[in-house]
Amino acid sequence: MVSIYARLAWTWTRAAAAYPGSFVLMIVLGFATTALDVAVILVVFANTTTLAGFSRDEVLFLYGTASLAFTVCDMFVSNIDRVSQHIKAGTFDTFLIRPVSAWLQLCADRFNANRIGRVLQAGLVLGYAVAALDLDWRRAWMIPVMVITGIVIFSALWTLAGAVQFVLTDAPELVNAFTYGGHQLTQYPLSIYARDLVRSVTYVLPLAFVNWQPGLYALGRDDPLGTPEFMRFLGPAAALALALAAALAWRQGIRHYRSTGS
């Protein structure tokens, strides 16, 4: 499965690299565009010393872990949200008749390697934050767990978004509210939001397990909203549950797909 994806991605990358100047420029622009989110955080801390009790470097840590997971998914999985375009154009059938998973083909469809600039930016911010905070090494094991958990959660969200488009073919922007919107939400401490919103992204849509709950453990912080300590370690379980739900939804979408007719 991985080798097939790599071959498909390499095909699109080789096509894009045929214009090296444009290719490099898009990588730089991707890096610069995502850097604007960091600029916003720096502007906020130019006017205050803490945000909901969290320092600048702690917020950058939360931003870096969430953004690294999100940008990896944005690069490798997000093209699945184009499924509605294929359904309306009648080209989705071609994905189904090939001896490869339709999900895999859609993720690799029009693979955009120049999004690597966004991944690099997120990785650099996370590296800076970890160095600046001088985290307890006994808790540092949680950082790769956070990133992997975030990748699974965001991949599941994109898969759910794709599955929804089998029914709502004209609503890709609606489902983007849960993918790109989820990323924006996780860039900051969840304690800045209303309690009802935090409960919903903890117990319904588990975005809190991307970086908030495990991040509190890595930072050695108590939850300002009072959730119990064991919640810090439920990220992998929440990611697995959401991934299973997404796989089921995608399977049902494929089973109920009836082509476009002609």
Image: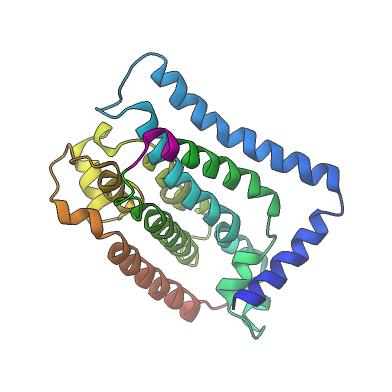
Q: Which of 247 and 211 is in front in this view?
A: 211
Residue 26 lies within the magenta run: no
Which part of the image, by quadrant, shows the C terminus?
bottom right
What residue is at 60 percent from the left and 55 percent from the top? 75
> Residue 137 vs residue 34: left or right?
left
Quarter-wise, where is residue 48 in the image?
A: top left
Q: Which residue is at the far right?
A: 18
In the image, taking residue 44 as reference, residue 109 lies left or right, namely right
Q: Is residue 131 magenta?
A: yes
Image quadrant in which you'd find residue 216: top left
Rendered residue at 42%/15% (across/down): 46
Pick the front one: 21 or 92: 21
Region rendered in magenta: 129-135
Residue 165, percent from left and from top = 49, 62
Q: Is the magenta stretch mostly helix, strand or loop?
A: helix
Residue 34: x and y, percent?
57, 36
